[in-house]
Amino acid sequence: MKIENIDALEDIDSFDEFDEQRAKRPLQTAFDSVMDRALSRRDMMGAALTFSVSTFLTSAAFPAAALAAPVSEDVFGFDNVAANSLDTVTVPEGYRWQVVTKWGDPLFSTAPEFNEASLGDAASQLQAVGDNNDGMSLFEVEGHTLLVVNNEYINRRIFYGNRHKGRPETADDIAKGKAAHGITIAELTFAGGREDGEWQLLKDSPYNRRITADTEMELSGPAAGHPLLQTEADPAGVSVLGTINNCGNGETPWGTYLACEENFNGYFSSSDEELELPEEFVRYGVGHKDFGYDWASHDERFDIARHPNEPNRFGYVVEIDPGDASKMPKKRTALGRFKHENAAVVLAKDDRVVVYMGDDERGEFLYRYVSHDPYVVGAPTSKLLNNGTLYAAKFYDNLKGAWLPLTPETTGMSPAEICIHTRLAASKVGATTMDRPEWVAAHPARAELYCALTNNKNRGVKPNAGGDETPAAGPNPREKNVYGQILRWLPDKGDHGASGFHWGLFALAGNPKLHKGAKAGSSNINTANMFNAPDGLAFDQMGRLWIQTDGKYSDKGDFEGMGNNQMLVGDPASGDIRRFLVGPKECEVTGLCWAPDRRTMFVGIQHPGEKGNSSFPLGGGHVPRSTVIAIRREDGEKIG
Ligand code: FEO
Ligand code: CA
Ligand code: CA
């Protein structure tokens, strides 16, 4: 497909696809490696699955007592929900859900209610919940319950549904778009009893605020001040306006929120069609055309012909103090620059801070950051995400793996360059190209990590954007991987600071109704629980893995019988997976967190009706709106 104009973006399935249409990649031709891949795939799948049911099941070294007790003998505590294509949320019997916030809900009583005809303007959007909620956390700050939620992007056809072909037309339209990005912080209150109580947004809370694509933030860490971060507006290279495309999230032990910038490249374009693109731009998908947001036409800093360093100031993890608006958000360059999915923060045995992070693009890498200094409760934390070492993951066919340090010695790049052009550094050390690493989740009671590898139709077909080969092997065993898989690994000696690990696959998604062999998926996938494109992952305190999907919802072809996007629960011990929730039409289910008493789970329903076929959550032909819902058990018992 040839992309001729921005409308074409609506017809393709992912931002990866758009990047590839703009920058064609060479076909892989080495016949030998094709043969090797075919052989190693069989071996690896067998070995990996054996590993997943033996090593993990027999390990007795883990302190199970640290986990909360399950509410029932059955670790799941609910019956599998059947797949469906309804325009609503479906949860198991014995559970109920309610809307908590949705795009455009005012945070202040001075702001207007959402207007379905005008769809708001920049002024109203600045005082309202942003669009496309994604990763989120709940914080308790001085007795107040704060929901902090990423607003990843906008769906033009809905967001500008009052404009011709859903295109922004005025400067205010663009400003409204920028105001709908970033992060929403909103105080929530709970009213009623355990069995009938409901959550709602507390208007006018002093904690309510928006962080947008224009909010001032600090560039910190090794890349701060580097010439590649310097611009006309910021000659020192230490201050940037805004955060964009915040996908997954993270939380630090010291109570801050991490928002992860993902497809930042899609906001930049060039007024000079002939502009030559440096290798680094090509690797990061920064090109002549944006994804259709059209920001450069009203804010020249998104024009790479005029401000070529501006894209270098995006693609980071941003640390935010949820309860203190006077503290400026900080982009933590030490955590690297790539299409960040989320940030899973844990402590090594010596209390150094370890952050696991995926780079969500076909054939990109899985990363780990280890701080130089340990986290000490009560001691200053401002440098813990500035001084440390980045590593990229290497997976070996013997089910072992290694974290390869990205240093001046291993890459020939300066510390600042490693932070800015992290992908190039990881290519230099020969890290393993992955099937789009999405969220990483850390088990709450032991050193055991999971990562959703959502899919990769290029696996075994062509290299990544940097030319690194993508053989079907190791944790990415299937060519033209349409379904995705969930990887897990155990750090050596149970220590997140160790340089090695053992890996296995928790699940290979597939369709056993249609296929035999690799496309049927692993043995824990059946016709009742099958899904595609695992994306969001999080553990509850009972040690159960919650799995959210951002996949094909056609319910046809390879995806027949899977219905809408959904949320499932995996049991790390048995490998069993059960479907808990089905989302409304054309949504993605992404983002989850729990109330402190674990009796409520908050779940994100992103972009319902992205192709025009939903009116969730209000129904009845109303404008579809991304929504945060709350789920509780009808008996008020714990849900995680
Ligand atoms: Fe925003 Fe990789 O999902
Ligand atoms: Ca995601
Ligand atoms: Ca996604």
Image (spheres, rainbow, N blue to C red):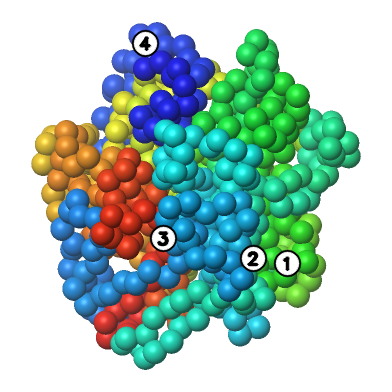
Residue at (43% x, 52% y) in the render: 117
Which of marks 1 and 4 precedes in the sequence? 4
Question: What residue occupies the far right of the structure in this picture?
Answer: 236
Residue annotated with mark 3: 627
Q: Secondary structure at mark 4?
A: helix
Q: Relative to 530, is 362 on the left or the right?
A: right
* In this view, 369 is above or below 140: above
Residue 509, percent across and down? Answer: 27, 43
What's under tag 2, amino acid-wise?
A: Arg
Task: Measure the alpha-carbon separation of dots 4 and 1.
Answer: 57 Å
Residue at (16% x, 33% y) in the render: 557
Labels 2 & 1 near each other (Cβ < 8 A): yes
Residue annotated with mark 4: 32
Task: Measure the alpha-carbon separation of dots 3 and 2.
Answer: 18 Å
Residue at (50% x, 81% y) in the render: 189
Res 437 visible: no
Q: Secondary structure at mark 2?
A: strand
Query: Can you tell which mark lies on residue 325?
Result: 1
Task: Kindly report which numbered mark, 4 or 1, lies closer to the viewer in this rendering.
Answer: 1
Q: Relative to 496, is 592 on the left or the right?
A: left
What's under tag 1, amino acid-wise?
A: Ala
The local crowd at label 3, few if under 14, some if 14 to 19, many if 20 or more residues have their Cα within 10 Å, is many
Labels 3 & 2 near each other (Cβ < 8 A): no
Q: Secondary structure at mark 3?
A: strand
| Mark 2 beta carbon near ligand 1 (under 8 Å) | no
Q: Secondary structure at mark 1?
A: loop
What's under tag 3, amino acid-wise?
A: Thr
Which of marks 3 and 1 precedes in the sequence? 1
The local crowd at label 2, few if under 14, some if 14 to 19, many if 20 or more residues have their Cα within 10 Å, is many
